[in-house]
Image (spheres, helix red, strand yellow):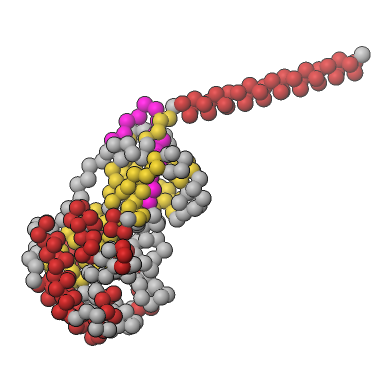
Amino acid sequence: MTAFIKNQWQANGYLILIAALFLLLMAGCQQKAAQTAEKRFIAPTAPEWLYTNGQWKEVTKADSDKAMQGWLDGKNGRHYGRRARIETDSSFATLKQRGIGGTVFIFVDGKQVVEQKLKADGKYLDIPIYKHKKGWHQIEIGFSNISEINGLYISEGAKAKKPKEKRKRLVVIGHSHADGTGTPNMGMEAMATVIGDIMGVESINQGIGRTDIDISSPPSDKNSALGRVKPDVIDLKPDYVLAIYGFNSISPINRGEMTHGQYQEKYAEFIKTIHDALPDTKVFASSIMATPSYSDEELKPYNEDIKMACSKVPNCMYIDMAGKLNEGNFDKYMAPDRLHPSTEGQRYLAEVYAKAMKSAIDK
């Protein structure tokens, strides 16, 4: 009889334990459901977003979800260095992000709080940004490579608004030296991006590799400087333009496919097209930088073309890069291909350009 009572007590104990676990599980589910119900979604196409640092394009994904992608009209494709900002008084914020590869960087009130690697699997990931905060905060999102915004979760009763853009605008257009080739983080460490950070301006990376003033790559794309000056420069209404061209015209000139005079005319046409549309915009025309394959002395005739073209158009300043890259610093500032600036080189050249432009702007 005693054993029977003992077994009965054990059985009752198990039932009580199971019931308690069930209640805890239900409470957790209810709490989770309540938390889910307490958040709301800010779609990427919502007016509260401010899309900066270049063109963006609304797209519809295979799952019918809307997304905003960093874009470059001149190549009709995705591009680097684009950023998105939003302000909210939410106590928490979580980014909805599709796996596009690379890394996403998230800043709150100017301070980086998240660096999250992304798989290139197309799957969605919720990335916590912050929680338990009070007051208004600005969130900025950048990417190491291509950019895509899929939305933001904030608390149900929170407000969100579009930040005001007060910065001056700089367009950096050119070949692969301009687009950031040479650094694995073309979105955040390319020369164009770093110039913007140094000068405190909205800098737009409009570089396309293997192109030049009148050279497209491939030729059918018509993405030369002259071919895309309107959508990629003029339509953005920049305060300043930095042109980094010339390198890809060396071989055609050497082969006799183009004369120095013709190149000079085309370059002047490019600058004049900008000036005619935007007479108050300051244009900076960079000389060709030395590489292990071309010394400053060998580049002199080509750089003279750029200098002369710039002198023919008002509000254009020639930036002489002679000596900035040389035998003494190639190992430090050139990527392994010995053609493009490395990450360190991108920053170094950004500092040189920023100093030259700032001195002219501050006059």
Q: Position of residue 359 (x, y in %)?
A: 14, 65
Left or right of residue 170: residue 75? right
Front-lying residue, 326 or 121: 121
Give the residue at x 11% y 57%: 277
Give the residue at x 38% y 68%: 182
Front-lying residue, 344 or 316: 316
Query: Furthest-bottom residue in view?
Result: 297
Query: Furthest-right residue in view?
Result: 1
Bounds of the magenta span?
A: 147-161
Give the residue at x 26% y 41%: 163
Residue 66 lies in quadrant: top left
How many labels, in total?
A: 0
Q: Is 69 colored magenta in this rendering?
A: no
> Which quadrant of the rendered structure holds the C terminus?
bottom left
Residue 305 lies in quadrant: bottom left
- Let me know if residue 192 appears in the view: no
Query: Furthest-front residue in view?
Result: 220
Q: Position of residue 176 (x, y in %)?
A: 32, 68
Front-lying residue, 224 or 178: 224
Q: Position of residue 354 (x, y in %)?
A: 22, 64
Left or right of residue 268: residue 138? right
Q: In this view, does 55 lie above or below 162?
A: below
Q: Is 148 colored magenta in this rendering?
A: yes
- Let me know if residue 262 appears in the view: yes
Q: Position of residue 230 (x, y in %)?
A: 19, 57
> Which quadrant of the rendered structure holds the N terminus?
top right
